[in-house]
Amino acid sequence: MKVKTISRSSDTYIPARNTQASALPRNLNPALHPFERAREYTRALTATKLERMFAKPFLGQLGDGHEDGVYHLAKNPHQIGQMVSGAGDGVVKIWDLGTREEIGSVKAHYGMCSGVSVVPTTNANDGKLLSCGDDKTVKLWAMGSSGFGHTGEDDAEGDAEEVKEDRRGARRSRDTGLIKTFVGEHGFKGVDHHRNDPLFVTGGAQIQLWDTNRSNYLSNLSWGIDNVNTVKFNHTETNLVASCGGLDNAIVLYDIRTNTAVQRTITTFRNNCISWNPMEAFNFVTGNEDHNAYLWDMRKMSHSLNIYKDHVAAVTDVDFSPTGEQIVTGSYDKTIRIYNARDGHSRDIYHTKRMQHVFCTKFTMDAKYIISGSDDTNLRVWRSVASERADIKSMKQRNKLEYDEKLKQRFKDMPEIRRISRHRHVPKVVKKAQEIKKIELDSIKRRRENEVKFSKSAKDKRLERERHVRGTVN
C-alpha cells in the first residue's frame, strides 16, 4: 500500500525572531470571528485611556525667557531649529530649539518691539531678520555667529558705560549685527518679508512696501486711514499681502504687482491676527475679538468657510501647521487651543498655572512642537500631540500605534470613548466663563430663531458663517 504524507515547513508557521511581520495564516471569514468587533472596541477603549494617561504636552521653556512680555514670534520657513522672539522692552532674541538655549540677543528698539520677521534662507550662516518698533524704525539684522549680539561672558564683561545705560533703560544695541535701518514717519505695527524677493511690508498708520536695498519705501498700499497691526505675505502667491487689525474691523488684500488693494471685507468685530495656509494658497485664518477664529477663502469673502470656537476671550494669535491640517490659537484667556482645520471645536487645550495672556503662538517647521509667548516673559515649548513621544520606535511599536489610531477613529463616536477622549481639565476661571458664555449663546440662539420665525427680513435669516460679515468691497 502506498501512503502519501503531508509535508509542511515549520518556517511557515513558526515566526522567526525580529521579523517585520508574522507568517501565520489568518482566515478572514467573519463567521469564524463572531466577537471581533467587541474585541476591537475593547482595544480602542484601552488605547483611548492610555492616550489620556500619557498626555503630557508641556516640555519646558526656552532659556530664561525675556525681561518683559513676549508679543511676537517668527520662524524661518526653510529651517527647523531657530525661532526669533520680540519683547515689550524692545529686545529681540534668537533661540536654538534643539538645546532650548538663547543664541543671541540685542536691544533692537527703544520702545516696544512691534514685529519680527525672518528673511527666508536655506543657509543658517547667512540668516537675517527684520524688526520694527514704536520708535519709527525698521532694522535689518545679521543672525550669523559673528553678527548678532551674543549672550555669555562677553556680554557680562561689557564696559561700565553700557551697564549704566542699560540700568536707565536706554542701552544701545551693538552695531556689529545691524546691517541697515529704515526710518519711517510713524510707528510701525507688524512686518513681514517676501518669500523670494528682497521686499518686505510694514503696517501701522500706513501699509508700506519696502526694498531692502533702498532707504525709502517703494509704495503705499493703504486703503483707508485706519491703523493696521498685522500684515502677512502669501506663502505661495507671493505677490499677495493680507492685513487686519484696524479699528474699522477690515480684512484687506493687496497685490504688490499693481500696488493696489484687491478686496476689503468688514467684520462685526476686530481681527487681531492672520495666517495663510501654506498648502492652499487661497485660504487663510484670522483670530477675532469675538473669541472665535475664522477660515476664509479669498475668492469669496462674503462668508467664512469655518468657525473655530471654544475660547472665552479674544484670540490674539493664530498659526497654520506646515501641513495645513492643524491650527493653533493663543488667547487672552491664558490658554492655547489646537484645531483640526476641518473641525469647528478644538481637539486639545494647553495651559499652566503660571501662564498669563498668550500673545503669540507658532508651530515649528516639523509640525511636532508649538512655541508660545505670553506677557509673563516666558516662551514655552509644547508637543503638538500631547501623548506623542519623539524617541526612536521599532517597526512593531509603529504598527501598534497606527493600529490603535485606526481603532480610535473607527469607534470615536461611541459614547464612552467620546467622553474619555474629550475630557480636559481647564482652569476654574475658564470653566466658569464657559458656563456663562453657554447661557449667553443659548439666549442669542433662541432670540434669532424667533426672529427668523416671525420676521420677513432676509437679513435675519443669514447663516452663522455669513452673520459676522458686514460687507465686502472689490
Image (tube, rainbow, N blue to C red):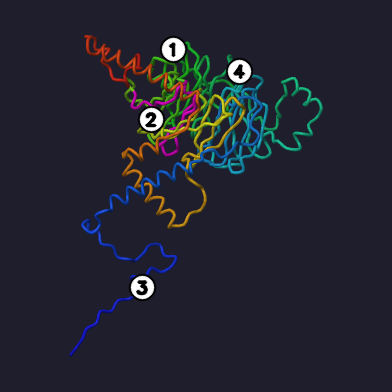
* Sequence-first tag of 2 and 3: 3
State the extent of the magenta-drawn residues as a range.
Answer: 304-331
| Residue designated by label 1 | 248
Could you tell which of marks 4 and 2 lies nearer the N-terminus? Answer: 4
Between 391 and 352, which is closer to the camera in this rendering? Answer: 352
Q: Nearer the viewer, mark 4 or mark 3?
A: 3
Evaluate if marks 4 and 2 touch, with contact meaning CB atoms under 8 Å apart: no
- In the image, taking residue 103 as reference, residue 274 lies left or right, namely left
CA distance for labels 2 and 1: 28 Å
* Dot 1 amino acid type: Asp
Q: Kindly indicate the quadrant of the structure image that contains residue 168.
A: top right
Q: Which residue is mark 3?
A: 11
Which quadrant: the N terminus? bottom left
Q: CA distance from mark 2 to mark 3?
A: 51 Å
Marks 4 and 1, how far apart at CA:
21 Å
58 vs 12: above or below:
above
* Residue 281 coordinates in the image, percent (x, y): 38, 32
Q: Nearer the viewer, residue 93 or 406?
A: 406
Residue denoted by label 2:
345
Q: Earlier in the sequence, mark 3 or mark 1?
A: 3
Tag on residue 134? 4
Q: Residue furthest left?
A: 1
Q: Is residue 301 within the magenta segment?
A: no
Name the residue at 30% across, 12% down: 447
Distance of label 4 from label 2 (alpha carbons): 36 Å
Is 14 above or below relative to 318? Answer: below
- Residue at point 63%, 29% (across, down): 92
Residue 260 in view: no
What amino acid is labelled 4 in the image? Answer: Asp
